[in-house]
Amino acid sequence: MGFVGRVVPIKDVKTFISAAKIISETIQEAHFYCVGPIDEDKAYYEDCKLLVKSFQIDNRLEFTGQQDVRKYYEFLDVVMLTSIREAQPLVVLEAFCCGIPVVSTKVGNVLEMLDFDERFLAASKDPKKLAFSVKLIYDNPKLMAALLKKKQEKIFKFFDRKEVHKKYGELYLQLKEKNYITDRYKGN
């Protein structure tokens, strides 16, 4: 299982660690990776390390620091997003593109990205529900293969880089033609 992001309070890495503790009790071979910068909030990182040690999962949970996440996407079985707040987390798009299921808190655009599928969504700071969702994925590989195929198709259809750039360009031109952009910044 992997968490991909900065080790800072808004990403709620402590909930990831708590879920890892619960998961480690039911999936014996589980290993956890926290992939991302650890130097942005050193006190929070130290708190996270203490929590891992107190849960006695320090032999199963690794803080990797800043890495090329593509290396981890090659072998992760689940990506967990435990943030308290997000807009549209790219980690969800990245995971789906790589064929990795996602378990997430209900933040930002994640609800739509996960098609409002409550089986894989949890309230903020709910490690039990996150762990339950991971176990559901672990116990149902055929279901997950079918769901992931649909997710990949959706991602490739709606998040094609060239198409997104084209749509933004068209929107910009429409707004420019209506003088919205120039009028707005003149105080109108």
Image: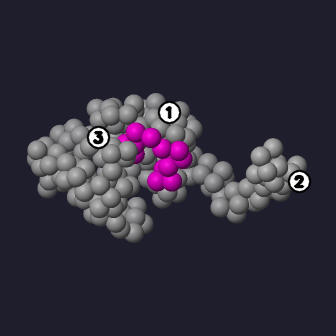
- Badge 1 element: loop
Residue 12 versus residue 77 in the image, above or below: above
* Residue type of the residue flagged with mark 2: Glu
Residue 2 versus residue 114 in the image, above or below: below
- Badge 2 element: helix
User: In the rendering, at what x and y percent does residue 163 appear?
Assistant: 72, 58
Cα separation, mark 3 vs mark 2, equals 48 Å
Q: Given this view, does label 3 or label 1 mark the residue nearer the observer?
A: 3
Does residue 101 show up?
yes
Q: Local crowd at mark 1 within 10 Å, few (<14), some, or many (≥20)?
A: few
- Majority secondary structure of the magenta segment? loop
Q: Which dot marks residue 117?
A: 1
Q: Residue at x 65, y 58 (%)?
A: 160
Residue 91 colored in magenta in the image? yes
Give the residue pinned by disc 3: 15
User: In the rendering, at what x and y percent does residue 47 appear?
Assistant: 19, 48
Q: Which residue is drawn at 56% across and 52% down?
A: 152
Give the residue pinned by disc 2: 177
Residue 152 colored in magenta in the image? no
* Residue type of the residue flagged with mark 3: Thr
Nearest to N terminus: mark 3 or mark 1: 3
